[in-house]
Amino acid sequence: MLFDKQTYVQRRSILKEQVGSGIILLMGNNDSPSNYPANAYRFRQDSSFLYYFGQHREGLAGIIDIDNNREYLVGNDIDIEDIVWFGSVDSVADMAAQSGVANTLTMAQMADFLSLAKKEGRTIHFLPPYRHDLMIQLMDMLGIHPSQQRSQASVALIKAIVNQRAVKTPEEIAEIERACAIGYEMHTTAMKMCRPGVTEQEISGRISGIASSKGCMVSFQSIVSMHGEIMHGYPSPRPLEAGRLLLCDAGAETNENYCSDNTRTTPISGRFTQRQKEIYSIVEQCHDYALSLAAPGVKWWDVHFGVCRLMTDKLKELGLMKGDTEEAVQAGAHAMFMPHGLGHMMGMDVHDMEGLGQTYVGFDDEVKPNLEQFGTNCLRCGRRLQEGFVMTDEPGIYFIPALIDDWKASGHCAEFLNFDLLETYKDFGGIRIEDDILITSDGCRYLGKDRIPYHINEVEEFINK
């Protein structure tokens, strides 16, 4: 457990107060087999269960009976067969005491408890599941088919959890900073390795090994690719080629599952070409502009579109875009170059709480998502920022050949785009710069003691010394 038990007691107390009535069911995760039952992936606990109960063992659940003011840690104690293979572990009763929970149930007892609650017509609040084994468990216990579970998940519980988890405490921020320190080592290693002949997979393997060597893991599958225009360009055995750019989007996740997430784009030959500098400098300016805008009370929606306007102005100077900037952004013409949002919340999940539904996490009654417009539909957050939010700042410019061809053929946003010049950029790739920021009382600050080089002169100096 990362925090003392009073932290978890207090978190559950606030949750009970916000939900108000009924039964809260928080499912922990089970082991996930890779290719046969005994060969499991590294275990990762469910974030919301971990946030409220603090326990990392597989096969657990938590019940908070608000109406009767009783809490239960649910799980089966391991038997001698398990001890032979995995050693002794704390009993469920011991783990409950560590988490400040007075009562325990076995898995079978939980099924009976929930069955009785259903017969009594009590409300059972649960979160939308994302693992199929838990979907089957929920179907067995609650009688809700997996296809209906997301729509029947408790909106009251989702909103209460988002309200709590979105604002990070100083202790949580310190843990995220630990992840950022590992991320710094990962990215600076990748930048030093970036030279012709080294493969994408070799770099990815090395930086994943750095996370593992700290007892941690990567916070998501690392994106390491010369094809930076592919949003999720996972590493291939392809050797790096002189004159091209390598985009590396990677992060670390600590033992307590707090994350970092950074992106750097490095010239494989050691120096940016003039054309690469021109595009890179726009992304660099957009990255820094977002930092000047982000502050409590400011809508992330406005930060995103402020960056889009700046990007449009700068691309007009290069001749890639044209026309009125405001009209171009309203039409979504800038999404040709940045088809994603400026950033997302980050914390115990690298895309924090995204599994609960982005409508509830990144948006609210004041700021609604626009799911219709290309690019804007991928904006993961738009709501007003609060002190204690952790966000990623990750503008990018990409030249996606298939997208260029598609918009050119249909004439989409033709009044704002120079398709003839775009044709000459089809072999460019993509550039993204990403850092993690904390919203403070009067603005924002970087997370992580050391800054991964990203200004053009700093990058060139760092990789060549």
Image: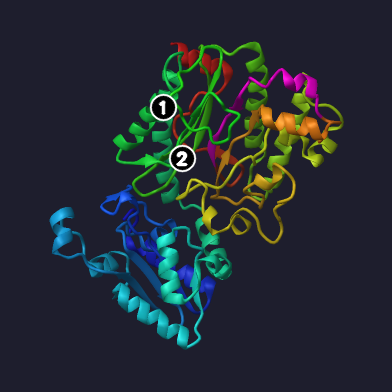
Q: Classify 10 Å Cα crowding around label 1: few (below 14), some (14-19), many (20 and above).
A: some
The spot of residue 237 in percent (x, y) is 43, 24
Q: For this rendering, which residue is in front, 225 or 288?
A: 225
- At x 57%, y 27%, the residue is 228
- Identified by mark 2, the residue type is Ser
SS of the residue under disc 2: loop
Residue located beneath label 2 in the image:
260
Q: Nearer the viewer, residue 39 or 69?
A: 39
C-alpha separation, residue under disc 2 versus residue under disc 1: 21 Å
Rendered-image quadrant of the N terminus? bottom left
Residue 459 to residue 147: above or below: above
Residue 403 in which image quadrant = top right
Image quarter of residue 105: bottom left
Task: State the image quarter where residue 37 is shown.
Answer: bottom left
Earlier-in-chain disc, 2 versus 1: 1
Q: In the rendered structure, which segment of residues is drawn in magenta?
A: 417-437
**Does 380 sit left or right of 408 as displayed?**
left
Q: Is residue 68 visible?
A: no
Can you give x and y, in whole percent of width and height, for residue 143 in the image? 47, 76
The amino acid sitting under disc 1 is Gln
Residue 24 is inside the magenta segment = no
Instruction: State yes or no: discs 2 and 1 in contact (Cβ < 8 Å).
Output: no
* Residue position for label 1: 201
* Along the viewing direction, whichever of 36 and 148 lies nearer the viewer: 36
85 with respect to 17 (left or right): left
